[in-house]
Amino acid sequence: MFGYVKAYKPDMRVREFEAYKAVYCTLCRQLGRSYGPFARLTLSYDFTFLALLYLGGEEGCPGYERKRCAFNPLKKCNYCKNTGEGMDFAAAAAMIMLYYKIQDNIQDSGFWKSLGYRLIKPLFSHARKKAGRLYPAVEELTGQYIAGQSALEKEGCTSLDRAADPTAKALGTLCALCGRDETQKRVLERLGYCVGKWIYLLDAAADLPDDLRTGSYNPLAAGRPGITGDNQGETAFIRQARERAKATLNVCTDEACKAFELLPVGRYEEILANILYLGLPNSQKQALEGTKAEQKELKHT
């Protein structure tokens, strides 16, 4: 995932924000405990959302405790005490998806551009194998998602729906694994599908200027020649392409919210609602209309 699925903090109550941070910090600790210190560097709010969905299906409060932060020992953070399998699942999914993303980037980049990915790949290879043994279903679906995505990119697919389908199906299946019964699984699959499609298309719209310059695949510009210089025609094309994407992005957000309304949530309901109703539109606005500093911050959280 890409760091877009996060809460809109200005509209959160203090207790909600503290609970949200506690889940985030607990996931960080779980990544380090299960897969080593480098795994903590992969932490993002996207997988915090996945952990919240898993934990949200449970009743009661997990309880919290204060411990020192691994990155800043002088600081204490709140952590969840009783998380069951939720954190293990989110951490394993993060490791598996990261590994395949690194592998995909190596295949899609030239030698020099892929050198950094080649250097870090061995660091996460063992973690991916360990996570795959614990959750073989996640390993299988991620491999299928990457293969499907690569095939569409080689084809030069121009359909936004087809191009986004592998990512959408992957997240839909991943979210369904968080369900406790068949009804819950179906709702979660629909929710995950819509969010996954939204993630893919938003990333494509945000990366459009860079992809045009480098000639990288982007469904919003498939078949279009790369930019040879800054001109009004290219600026107008980017604006029109983003407007085209926005229509689908808004539908995805609306459908995700409708699915959420059908979901019986035992805990973290307010936080999940904040992410879907306010966080997604805010991330979309920042990614497509924000300053370069805001866009950079969004991509690195």
Image: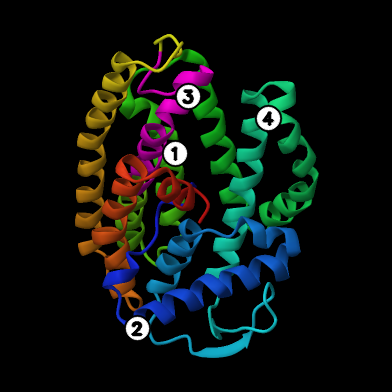
Q: Is residue 146 above or below residue 287?
A: above
**Rendered location of residue 175, percent (x, y):** 42, 55
What residue appears at the point 60 percent right and 67 percent down from the top-left corner?
88
The residues bearing labels 2 and 3 have C-alpha atoms spaced at a distance of: 40 Å
The residues bearing labels 1 and 2 have C-alpha atoms spaced at a distance of: 33 Å
Question: Which amino acid, by three-letter code, is at mark 2?
Answer: Val
What residue appears at the point 70 percent right and 67 percent down from the top-left corner?
32
Q: Residues within 10 Å of mark 4 (few under 14, many from 20)?
A: some
Element carrying mark 4: helix
Q: Residues within 10 Å of mark 3 (few under 14, many from 20)?
A: some
Q: Residues within 10 Å of mark 1 (few under 14, many from 20)?
A: many
Element carrying mark 3: helix
Q: Earlier in the sequence, mark 1 or mark 2?
A: 2
Q: Is residue 243 above or below residue 291?
A: above
- When asked about the image quadrant of residue 20, the answer is bottom left
- Dot label at residue 167: 1
Q: Earlier in the sequence, mark 3 or mark 1?
A: 1
What residue appears at the point 53 percent right and 78 percent down from the top-left corner?
83
- Dot label at residue 106: 4
Question: Which amino acid, by three-letter code, is at mark 1?
Answer: Thr
The residues bearing labels 4 and 1 have C-alpha atoms spaced at a distance of: 18 Å
Q: Earlier in the sequence, mark 4 or mark 3?
A: 4
Q: Which residue is mark 2?
A: 14
Question: Which amino acid, by three-letter code, is at mark 4?
Answer: Ile
* Model colouring: rainbow
Residue 42 on the magenta span? no
Q: Earlier in the sequence, mark 4 or mark 1?
A: 4
